Amino acid sequence: MDIMVDALHNYFVEVVTILGMVVWSIRLEGKVKQQQDISRRQYEELRALDIKLRGFDSKILLKLSEIAERLSYIEGNLKGSNKDHY
């Protein structure tokens, strides 16, 4: 029993250091896992937003083409009405 007490007394700093390193690595692993989960969620949210924005872009392009078509029609009518006056 005295041998174990002497060994513990002699290597106390080393034992505490090793235990501290083990606890620190376990906590670090948990934080890394948590960050990976957060990153994965954010990536999924970004993909969903990207899909939503692409749909929005296509709607905008459709409306712009409708507006361009209507402006061409108005322009044609204005040119046609100007010919009647000359």
Image: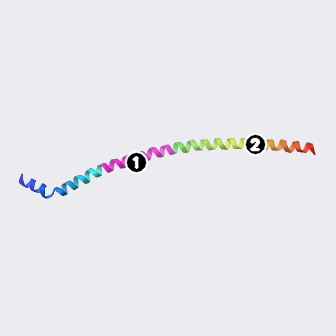
Q: Judging from the image, what secondary structure is the residue with disc 2 in?
A: helix
Q: Judging from the image, what secondary structure is the residue with disc 1 in?
A: helix
Q: Of callouts 1 and 2, which one flags the residue occurring earlier in the amino acid sequence?
A: 1
Q: Is residue 38 magenta?
A: yes
Per the rendering, the mark at residue 69 is: 2
Looking at the image, residue 2 sits to the left or right of residue 84; the answer is left
Magenta region, residue range:
27-46
* x and y, in percent, of residue 13 in the image: 18, 57
The picture quadrant where one finds residue 67 is top right
Looking at the image, residue 47 sits to the left or right of residue 28; the answer is right
Query: What kind of residue is marked 2?
Result: Glu
* Residue at image point 51% right, 45% down: 46
Query: What kind of residue is marked 1?
Result: Gln
Magenta region's main secondary structure? helix
* Residue at image point 81% right, 44% down: 75
* x and y, in percent, of residue 40 in the image: 44, 46
* Residue at image point 40% right, 48% down: 36
Looking at the image, residue 7 sits to the left or right of residue 40; the answer is left
Per the rendering, the mark at residue 36 is: 1
* x and y, in percent, of residue 28 in the image: 32, 51
Q: Is residue 28 magenta?
A: yes
Per the rendering, the mark at residue 62 is: none
* Residue at image point 63% right, 43% down: 58
The picture quadrant where one finds residue 59 is top right
Q: Callout 2 environment at 10 Å: few (<14), some (14 to 19), or many (20+)? A: few
